[in-house]
Image: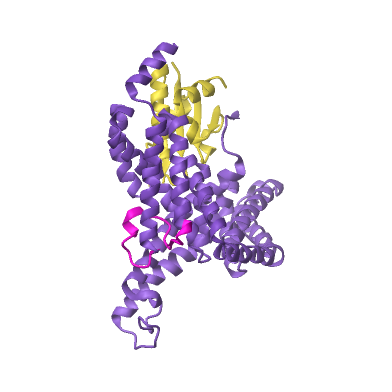
Chain colours: A yellow, B purple
Amino acid sequence: MAKIVAITSCPTGIAHTYMAAEGLELGAKRLGHTIKVETQGSIGTENRLTEQEIAEADVVIIAADTKVDLSRFAGKKIYETASNAAIKNGANVIMAALAL
Amino acid sequence: MTSQTGKALPGAYKHLLTGVSYMIPFVVAGGLLIAIGFAARGIYAYDAALGLDGKAIEPTAWTTFWANIFAIGAKGGFGLMVPILAGFIAFSIADRPGLAPGMIGGILAGTTGSGFLGGIIAGFIAGYATQWLNNAIKLPRNLAGLKPVLILPLLSSLIVGLLMFYVVGTPVAAALTALTDFLKNLQTGNAIVLGLILGAMMAFDMGGPVNKAAYTFSVGLLSTQVTAPMAAVMAAGMTPPLGLALASWLFKNRFSDDEREAGKAAAVLGISFITEGAIPFAARDPLRVIPSIMVGSAIAGAISMAVGAQLHVPHGGIFVLPIPNAVDNLLGYVIAILVGTVATAGMLFVLKQPVAAEAESSAAAD
């Protein structure tokens, strides 16, 4: 069982951001991993990842169409993809990320 | 830090979308306030000393108030639109040091008449120049603070500014004028083709990058008073969720229980021009849903262009239709949206199979 942290973000920041988060959460649940997803939508950052959570994570998933600040994840394995990939099949994204 | 890119968007496109993402609230606030100003005080609302017919009058508290409302939208919102776009494109590329040269380049795009095209170019120049300077310039530890505070802002702004004035400004202004003239004088046949293309793009990924390209194109054009593509794009962005809501309500046996629930949400999202309402349906059944919504959106876009509908605001869905002056040719525009919605529902009826039969055939195929 892996510990995953993720960030989702999209241009309008009202729909894809949250659907991608849901996709990843469902995917993780199906595969039996734990995940925490921080959303960076137009309303701002919600469900912010703590330093502890980042330090304990096995992999960082960035499912975003806009720029996400990666300096918080120095030294971690990062898997970047588009938000659509997480919406369509969160489990596949997680499996690809863990294969890094 | 090991990094792997799995089907992420190309870097340059991500930078553009980041800029657009920050720009949208400025355009929405600006556009809606301008429309409200027009609604209250006619087409000369921006001038407290002009009457409804354009003749000179004595300014009053009333006329001044609406001129202020208009200014909040035009000078405030729209005035910041291009600098923010440029600034955050640069920010996406070069992080915080990119913001200042990006926004400076963006405002010079206005000065040189190169508009939102110039702004996009300025953003990329500022971003890559700042990033290059940041990597190329190395300072001893006790002088390191000088880099972000003094050296980077000065040099990067200088580079962007000079390039805007001497290289980018004039040709891009000419290109923008040519584009604007071309679009304003579009013959009906070509206008319909443009409507079809923009419409199909809006439905293709429902709020994703292709949709955003069509949307950004149309919103950018608002700053040059070309307003027909904006109308086509908003109509085409409303028909996917509206068509799916209609279909899931009329043709119940072709949708699962939670799809029918999603249909109700899609109705609300559709009238608000939130195309993403269609995504749950498309995710479940892309090969049937996506062509259906593309057809409906293309039709809506084409009709909107054909009847000459114009939209002066960048968002708001059904809620901006009653605002006087927000839409030109309101009746034709409403028809475009209705026909597109019905066409979407019709395509879904034809393509989608009854849910029970689908479960049987997929069980048989296993």
**Is residue B82 or residue B232 the one in the foreground?**
B232
Vertical comparison of B72 with B266: above or below = below
Residue B275 rendering spot, x and y as whole percentages: 40, 44
Q: Quadrant of residue B107?
A: bottom right
Residue A70 rendering spot, x and y as whole percentages: 53, 38
- Quadrant for the C terminus of chain B in the image: top left
Residue B61 rendering spot, x and y as whole percentages: 29, 81
- Quadrant for the N terminus of chain B in the image: top right
Q: Quadrant of residue A30?
A: top left
Query: Is B192 placed left or right of B318 in the picture?
Result: right
Is B187 part of what is drawn in magenta? no
| Residue beneath the point at 32% across and 20% down | B356
Vertical comparison of B194 with A92: above or below = below
Prevalent SS, magenta region:
loop
**Is residue A63 or residue B282 the one in the foreground?**
B282
Which region is colored magenta? B305-327
Is B326 part of what is drawn in magenta? yes
Residue A46 rendering spot, x and y as whole percentages: 37, 40
